[in-house]
Amino acid sequence: MIKVKTDYLGRDVDYVAYADEIEKINQGIDAKSLPGSDFLGWANYPEEYDKEEFARIEKAAKFIREEVDTLVVAGIGGSYLGARAAIEAINGLYGDDKMEIIFFGNTMSGKMSKQILHKLEGKKFAINVISKSGTTTETAVAFRVLRDLLVKNVGKEEAAKLIFATTDKEKGALLELSKKYGYERFVLPGNIGGRYSVYTAVGLLPMAVAGIDIQAFMDGALNAKRAYDSDEINEAYKYAIIRHELYKEGYPVEMLVNYGLHLVQLGEWWKQLYGESEGKDKTGVLPDAAVFSTDLHSLGQFIQEGSPVLFETVILEKDGEDDVIIPHDEDNLDQLNYLEGKGINYVNNTAAEATLQAHSNTGGVPNIVIEIERFDAFGLGELMYFFMRACAASCYLNGVNPFNQPGVEVYKKNMFHLLGKPGY
Ligand code: PA5
């Protein structure tokens, strides 16, 4: 199970002072009596998910893996970040799997779009278009150009068999389009918002196509649900309380730190979860993310000695499976023989320990450590639920609704107006 460690926090936290508030929050989540309660479907989802659809997801993934070697996922924000984070964290960036997953619809850069389409030219590929509203501009534009290309490549009839749509069950442009062309459909339940949707088909279909054991992922989520859905101050609520205390003390920025470049997207997913949930009413901790030791060579200086605005939340894997042993070298001109026979993980873990000491003990930067067993399907399933539960509690501690995002609409309205969309 996940452990929240405070050895490098540099202060004591009075959890007991939060006991009543946390009890109310937990009961409020369960009773769906708090603001945003229409979007609490994720909380029980690891227990209550649709098993028939789950089986259909596995079947569709098998079909895709047999038919093509590329899946393009068209989606933005909560409609792709969870899948991408889980795929990269579990599979790494250079795995042996023949299946390539391309994420598109998450940018409107002409250069990126052209390159992706060029790569798919003349190719048989599959598309998973994901949009709850069915009208998100980035996703809709990407889907239109992808569909156009796929039809050119394989013909209309074949294309329809290779397109999978994940959207609302009852409404939206994508639902209508999917019905008209006969695409296989998966559901993003109405009571689950995008950034809380990784356990639905939104996350599961791309993950299953990437060869991930999605049952283990759901088992991990269930384990976490059982542990963190409690009136007591469990590990998820402990994390929420600590970051709330630090915010009150004058730390408006949280940096999530991971120790591997395959975890960059986990940081992106987490940034969306916390940023879009908590950043309201001129309150909230700004979520930032970094990967060490990589970013110690860029941001390390600021963290150690710059403006004291941030605290760090460091995720450490206890039991990393894959490793490379540093070999002996006859000449030892690189002077590394003192490390011969040691794993690169050992060096990474030592860097983590040294950095915690440097940032916390020397630099005075509060550090929360989240220890997880392993970045496998089960471990990620647990970790993502842990963060969701803690995020909801953090927002309620700040008095904001975790499940809306009214601020995101402002740029959309301006953009539609400038683009000349009818009605704007
Ligand atoms: O978390 C959210 O709700 C958002 O990030 C949405 O997922 C994102 O804006 C995409 O929306 P949609 O799925 O409707 O295309």
Image (tube, rainbow, N blue to C red):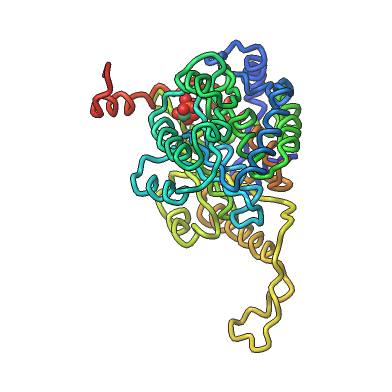
Q: Position of residue 229 (x, y in %)?
A: 71, 24
Query: Which quarter of the picture shows residue 167?
Result: top right
Look at the image and tell me whether residue 274 can be seen: no
226 with respect to 410 (left or right): right
226 with respect to 108 (left or right): right
The residue located at (76%, 33%) in the rendering is 219
How many numbered dots are placed on residues in this image?
0
Q: Is residue 27 above or below residue 107?
A: above
321 with respect to 86 (left or right): right
Q: The C terminus lies in which quarter of the figure?
A: top left
The residue located at (71%, 67%) in the rendering is 343
Look at the image and tell me whether residue 195 can be seen: yes
Q: Is residue 234 above or below residue 372?
A: above
The residue located at (67%, 31%) in the rendering is 57
Q: Position of residue 10 (x, y in %)?
A: 59, 46
The one of 4 and 320 positioned closer to us in this rendering: 320
Q: Is residue 327 above or below residue 305?
A: below
